[in-house]
Amino acid sequence: MDPPKVLPINPRLSAKNQQENIKKVAVTRAGEQALFLELDQNRPLAAIIQDISERWNLANPDDYALQFSEPNRQTYITERNRSEIANGNVLQLTSSPAKTALGIYAKLKDGKPEERLDSLKKLSSLAADSTFAMEFINKDGHLLIIKFVVDGKHHGEPLSYILKGFVSLMDHGVVSWDVLQVDFTKKVTECVLSSKSGNSCIQAGLEILECVVLHSSASNKVDIVEHYILGQHEKIHSHLQTPELQKNSMALLNALFSKANPVKKKEISKLVQSKRFRNIISTYVIGSGRVPGSDMAHHLYVLQTLMLSMFEDRMNTPADPQDQMVIKNIETLRPTAIAIDSDSNQPGTRKSNLYRKLGFEDLATPAQDFAKNTPPGILALDNIAYFAEKHQENYVKVVLENSSRPDEHDCPFIKASIMLTRILCEILKIGEPPREEGEKYHPMFFGHEEPFQEFFCICIQLLNKTWREMRASTEDFQKVLGVVREQIGRALDMQPTSLETFRSRLNQLTYDEIINLWERERLSKEEWESQAIPIIELRQEITPCILDLIKQQRLNYLMEGTRFHKYNIKGKNKDKMWCWRLSPNHKCFHYADCGEGDIPTLDHMPNKLPVSEIKSIIKGKDCPHVKEKTKARPTTATTLAFAIQPSSTTTDSPESFCFVAKDECEFDMWMDGLNILQSAEMGSEQKKKDLELLLNMEIKILMLDAEGISIPTEPPPIPPEPDNYDFAYASL
């Protein structure tokens, strides 16, 4: 057997890889002249620190560590994150995390007041670093912080540093929230409710209480928060009027709402629907032209979802025909204006006639209509009773109008109300848990004490109006419901700020207007779609060019950059975002932390992930940051989740970069772009939509010269060949 051939090493490739592993950086230290180094990423970090220590004549190199020096990134450099070092970075040599944690712990425990305050400042700054946090927690530093809070000897600025540092330590998920004492929860609650506490103390306290409610398994701690916060809800009203505290106040309120028992939920629901609370939301959060940020929009969406979820039990509860309240509500539906046939002298006949005119299907036991149709169950009867009581004039007008029509054109009021309630529950997704990425809320639901019932009252009048405009008969019942659903959906898409605005939008969307909209949409669709064989062949001819155009657009989208909420394998990092964008040469991704409203330039994004080092792309429920959650309860938008898994050669223990797109379009853009970079086919729904749109546009442009010419569905037959071709040169 011939010996295997050994391929020669490409010296150019080897030199290039070696050059990429050399990072030109500066290293500073207080009292020392800066060093300009060519840092070899293949060397152990301990060896590099030892060389630096020798150049500055520092003993015990193990007591030192390198740290990024940017104001918003002063994290320690470890073997896990050293790949983030880029050319031009300024690093600083500082005490190691272990030594720093030990020093801070010692001064917090036995230091002088000024030393303790300085250590608290350092703690609040360094606690966000996972390496330092682990060292500090291993020394039971978090227990010392808990003791400080329980003792109640710190106030003002020191307390704000204590609470901020504690929040940052707990954010790493190393310590369970069950470690907290009841007295700790009481002290933090008192801080939040105290008028003497500063905004920084209150903000950190609100965040701690939110986490206690969401993550603590001890009900007594949650009960304490409920007792104090709900007992003094005027303090929450005050915090909602302070811009710095609005998000945390809403987050705590939502946490209490979601974790409360049914009795407490009713209490909280009554609180958030009170006139005082609604005025605060309208004035300080969404009113006066304010546009809430994405975090506040999410909190408003969650609050709206929780408010509407209060109707879930009624929606899924069938009416009991023996329930006296059900019987009473049905009896009160009889308006005095209904004319009863003169020959209906028997009480039973009169009642049956009344129920028939109202639109009941079961004339003997009308409550069965609300039992058989579940959902919406008894919720439909609640809506009808509210309409009859609060809007009696409009109720009588609707019922009288229907009773005066011929039987074949009569709109069954009760049946229509039941079906309409079901449609409203589907549109508003009552019964579904809030999505982690949801941001769509309706301001008009924060403008009335009974928003859902008022919503129904407006929509049932719309249904009656649409029935009249369509001149519908009983056979057209489902068709009318379809038009009404379309009217409501289009009106909600306009984001009305109040119920009156919603009503006016519905009045503009008449049946004729809906028909015109559908007709324009149909004609537009038919204009772009043609089944003629020549057009089909032309589409096939230009499809490759269009696909190349879509690929370029996807890469451009990635180069523009996208902001994501920051995730790791444990889940979402609260209030943290980062930006990812593709380099112009399509060879690597740049990423960095960013604010809510900005996308940094490439010069401010030092972290890189080479495209060649991407091992695989994971999406959906298989992603590590949503995999565990979907096993319990699928509250995370798993369909929008994806993760980039680096190859095993990038780091010793690579982690996946985890993302959740804000919507399906953003998800499709990134999946298409990543597939292109990996030489795979684009398979998203957005790609199909874009391909269809661009093909239709290109076909229309190419067919401008053929305007007015009818294109045959089949190509014309090829004529037979002539006997000879002498005619071709007849003029010669």
Image (tube, rainbow, N blue to C red):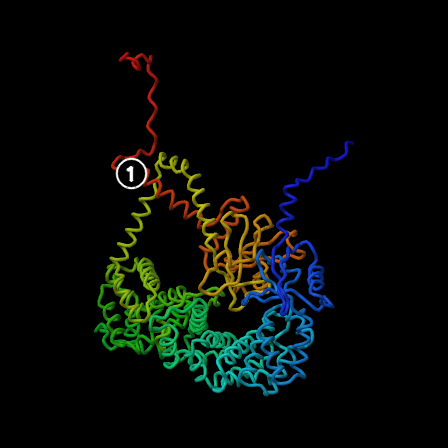
Residue at 29% of width from left, 14% of height from top?
727
- In the rendered view, would you say 661 is above or below 74? above
In the figure, residue 335 lies in which quadrant? bottom left
Q: Is residue 452 visible?
A: no
Residue at 39% of width from left, 74% of height from top?
285
Closer to the camera in the image, 433 or 115: 115
Closer to the camera in the image, 183 or 23: 23
In the figure, residue 495 lies in which quadrant? bottom left
Q: Identify the element where label 1 is drawn.
A: helix
Q: Position of residue 577 (x, y in %)?
A: 51, 64
Closer to the camera in the image, 548 or 67: 67
Residue at image mark 1: 704
Closer to the camera in the image, 548 or 444: 548
Q: Position of residue 55 (x, y in %)?
A: 70, 62
Q: Position of residue 58 (x, y in %)?
A: 71, 67
Q: Is residue 116 left or right of residue 597?
A: right
- In the rendered view, would you say 69 is above or below 345? above
Q: Is residue 17 left or right of residue 222?
A: right
- In the rendered view, would you say 665 is above or below 304? above
Which three-letter amino acid code belongs to the residue tagged 1? Leu
Q: Position of residue 645 (x, y in %)?
A: 59, 54
Q: Is residue 696 visible?
A: yes
In the picture, which quadrant includes the C terminus? top left
In the picture, which quadrant includes the N terminus? top right
Q: For label 1, count other residues whose C-alpha is less than 10 Å away and answer few (under 14), some (14-19) or many (20+).
A: few
Marks counted in the figure total: 1
